Each structure stands twice: as structure tokens, then as C-alpha cells.
Image: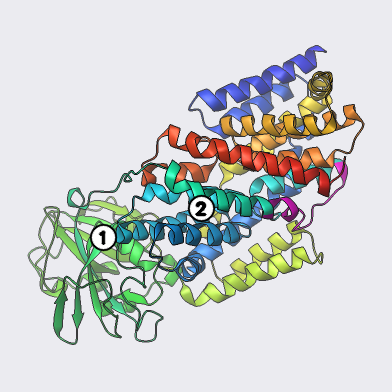
Amino acid sequence: MTWQAVYALVSVAAVLGALAFTRIAADVIVMAALAALLVAGILTPGEALAGFANPGVMTIASLYVVAAGLKETGAIKWLAMRVLGQPGTIGLALLRVLLPASSLSAFMNNTTVVAMFIPAIQDWAARLKLPPSKLLLPLSYAAILGGTCTLIGTSTNLVIDGLLQTQKDIHLSMFALAWVGVPLVAAGALFLYLFADRLLPNRQGVLEQLELAREYAVEVLVDPSGPLVGKTIADAGLRSLAHGYLADIERKGRLLTAVPPETELLQGDVLVFIGAPECARELREFNGLKPAGGDVHKLDIAHHHRCLVEAVIGPDFAGLNQTVKESRFRSRYQAVILSISRDGRRLPGKLGSIQLQVGDTLLMETAQDFVDQYRYRKDFLLVSALNDSTPPNFRKAPWALGVLGAMVVASASGLVSILEAALVAGGMMLTLRCVPASKARRYIDLSVLVVIAASFALGAALTKTGAAAAIAETITMIDGLSPWLALVLIYLLTVIFTELITNNAAAVLMFPIAVAVADGLGVDFMPFVIAVTIAASASFMTPLGYQTNLMVLGPGGYRFTDYLRVGAPLSLLVCAIAVTIIPQVWPF
């Protein structure tokens, strides 16, 4: 090998080691490798930066905006409540997790789907008296498997499609991967249904202790024209929130305490929840609930500019020792108090009649610029906004779902490419105001896009210097190596890379090696490319291999060995099915 090939291999090895064994941000590591290849003259500036112009990267960026529209309108929460339901046994709970999660993740961002399902599953666990560890890891695995069914199911599929377009002038259709993905979902779901309960531990999650948090009482009104009227508390999903609990119901002048979960909700009911400040944010995600205080609707602030803010009253606060009503708080601060906490405990009684004192912590609905406006004023000692607390705009949810459906149909029918469909869908989300442009920018994860785009430089260096061909030649020199055995070897190598580093980086690094192995054997490269695509997503054995695995780590109370116990046999099952089906659909 030339020194350039050795340099490229050392660079890749350094990236793999840094990603696996250090805490340096992935985008910093990969960009440093790109710079090293550029400065050494291995790659020209155009070659080093080609990944930033790749269609797959731009498609992923556009899909972030589509996902933002779905989340901001509450469309995903709406879907979750309808498709998950309220199962009665662990077996039914697993089915309710596996089938909807895998189906939705085929068309939506996996991370968003898992994030929305976690609270619902915690509700099941509390109601059925089951440990969440029996359900949350199957949720992550179902989302991963579902992502292998369509081109937009996961960013890895789009990365490989981008490489095929730029290097081979080949486009994958929307459902090209379904020939492999659908059987994988069916087999994986059956495996998890039969063995997840036996293999997963009986362990509680790392739950937030409400008694240690600032405690508030949050009142919400059952909207007379909303979808919750006539539903029981359990069916509405209000039985067990992650950050609070239902304490009382005020109904026609009567106070109902210790209400059972089968209690029906009536129009005009005022529900009193007690919990941490995040409880108010959770309640925003339920279509059919609105703040009980009428003053909220008097705020002259656009819907998408509102958020929840906590503020501690300071000694220079203008309304000290006055009641909330006397202080004219809303008109003075353009904010409405939802609840008041004193010495870490909620204050009972009507909000309007509570006298405000130094040190009281207010939970308010106000404009997003409230924090910047009052951070350095003496009215408040401390001001902080709750993350992701803008109320969903449920009226726009049908539009958001319609845009998603139109994007899938347009791309699947071949009318437009997936990039064109994603760009138009993202533009429609902005045009229809499903998500404001300022918020859409924050949903785009630039660090992920940088890692993906910069990783293309590593793959280009392996190809240009002949390092990929050298690795492929070493693999093909194995005695008695048939194309099928080579396919298995490429698949397993990709799985190992995926468990150690990011799935997208693993796909980009293995792509040139897979193509070179196919060329060395004199067979078609497509089976090997598809194997890399599937294997790069099939991360089941470590919490770090895929983001959704990491998301359920805390809520499920998992340890590293739990992933290995379930993930290792699932990985072998997926590998066996994939390498059997792939050559049948894409012959050597």
C-alpha cells in the first residue's frame, strides 16, 4: 500500500478509537479527520466537502422540519393515544408497543416516535403494576426494525441512497428495502413477544422523585368540544403522568377526591394535578385540555410564541404582599400565573386571592422572550424557561399528517425523488404554519448532519487511496470465500462498527469496502450495499449504538448486560434473515 493508503487507514482507525473510547463530540472528531486528510493532500477541497452537497444529507435536514411540524402540532401524540390504547396484560402491552411503533417509525423519525411513546408506556407500567423494563427496550428495538422498511425510515437509508446516487447513479425507491425490512419486523416482533418478558429484568426505572422537586398544583379544564369528554381517566392517558398525578376533580361545584381511573370525564370538569413544573408541560400535549384560568386566553401573544417559565419573586417585586388579582400581574408582565410554590410546596386555594411574597416560585405562561427581558431585572431573583413547553397547535395536526401522507405517496409513486418530496414537505410545514421557521431551525440537529457529511470524506479517502481495495483484497483472499460468505462477513463487520460508533459513520465507512469486495469477487455490488444498509441500523447490543437505545436506558433502569442479553440473539436472528433474503431480491 502507498503512504496515502496507510494515512487514510490510520485516520479511520483514529476516528473509530476516539468515537468509541473518548467523550469528545462526534462532529469534532470527524471534522478533525476531514481536516487532516485535506491538509495532507489526500483529498482536494471539493472531495473533502462533497458530503455537504450529498442529496441524502439535505433530505435528512428536510425531514427534521417535517418531524418538527408533526411534533409541534401534537400529531404524533394524537396518533400514539389512538394506536396504543390501554392494554390489560403484558402480552397485549408488548403487541401494542411492537406493531404501532415499528409501523410509525417506517415513516417518521425514530427518535421522535420513541420519545412520544415513553410516557404512554410508563402509564401502562404504573397501571398494570409492571416494571417499565419489560416494555421500553422492545419499544426501541421495534423502532429500529421499522426504520428498515422504507427509504425515509432512518437516516442511514438516506445516507446509502445518497452514496448510490453520487457514485453509481442509482436511486432506491421508497419501498425498495421493504422486501427485507418487513420480514425483519415480523421476525423481530415475534422474537420479542415470545422472549422479551423472560430475558428482560424486573427492574424499575430512574423515576423523578416529586417530593424533592418544586411542587405545583396545575388546574386544567376539560374542553366541552374536545375529544376527552366521555372518556375515562385511564383511557384519556391521564392516570399516571411522568411528572405529576391527578389529585382532585372539581365538577359543578363539588370536589371529587381520590378519583378512580374508571371515572368518566365530563365537559367543564376542572382537573387538579399535583407535581413538578414539567407536569404542566405534559398536560399541554393532551388535545382536549386547556388551562382552567381564563386569563391565559387574554394574553396578547401568538400561540407558537408562548412557553412555560419559572420565576422566583425578588425583594423589588412591585406586587409584594398584594394578591395576584390586586397586583395586576397579567397586564404588568404579559404573563399568566398557573401555579405558585412556596418553600417547595404548592399553595392551596384560589390563585387570585394568594398574597405574593419574596421567594415564591411562580409557574407562568408567557412569551418566549420573557426570560431575556427579566433575567437582569430586580423584580425576580431567578427566571428560567421550561424546555419544549410551547403548547401544541392541535388545529394544525390534520394538515401536518396530510403533508406527511402526501410526501410518502409522491415519493413512493415515483412522481418526484425523495429529496424533492422532503423539500416540498418541509416547505409546506412552514407555509401552513405547522411549525414556525425559528423553531424549525432549532429542530435541525446540525451536529448529526456534520457527522454524516464529514464521514463521506473518510469513505472517499479509503476509495481514492486504494485502502478500501486493499481491505477487500484481504477479505477475498480467504480460502473458499463464496459471495454469500463474503456478504455475511460484510454484514458482521458493519454490525461491529455500528455498535462502536454512530450508525451513519459505520455505513459511510463500510460502503467503499463493500463495493470493493463485490468488484474483487466479480459480482454485483447491490447485495453488499443493502447488507451494509440493514446492518448499520441493526444496533441492538449496546446502549450507545443507536440513539433510541440510549433514550430508554434511564426510564427502563437498564444495565449494559440487559442490552447484550436480548440484543445478541436478536442481532443473530436479524443477520440470518437478512443475508438469506438479500441475495434472493438482489442476486449476486
Residue drawn at x 19%, y 87% is: 252
* Kind of residue sitting beneath label 1: Gly
Residue 110 image point, x, y percent: 56, 52
Secondary structure found at label 2: helix
The residue segment tinted magenta is 168-182
Nearer to us in this view, 266 or 350 = 266
Picture quarter with the N terminus: top right
> Between disc 2 and disc 1, whose residue precedes?
2
Residue drawn at x 50%, y 39% is: 566
Residue 383 image point, x, y percent: 27, 53
Q: Is residue 65 above or below residue 352?
A: above
Residue 441 image point, x, y percent: 55, 54
Q: Does the magenta stretch include residue 181?
A: yes
Residue 381 image point, x, y percent: 20, 50
Nearer the observer: mark 2 or 1; the answer is 2
Residue drawn at x 54%, y 62% is: 100
Label 2, residues with CA under 10 Å away: few <14, some 14-19, many ≥20: some
Q: Is residue 7 magenta?
A: no
Q: In this view, does 552 lie above or below 329?
A: above
Give the dominant element type of the magenta stretch: helix, strand or loop: loop
Q: How far apart are marks 2 and 1 (CA)?
A: 31 Å
* Circle on res. 193: 2
Colour scheme of the picture? rainbow
Residue drawn at x 69%, y 70% is: 406
Label 1, residues with CA under 10 Å away: few <14, some 14-19, many ≥20: many
Q: In this view, does 399 lie above or below 159?
A: below
Secondary structure found at label 1: strand
* Kind of residue sitting beneath label 2: Tyr
Q: Which residue is tagged 1?
A: 244
Picture quarter with the C terminus: top right
Dots 2 and 1: beta carbons under 8 Å?
Answer: no
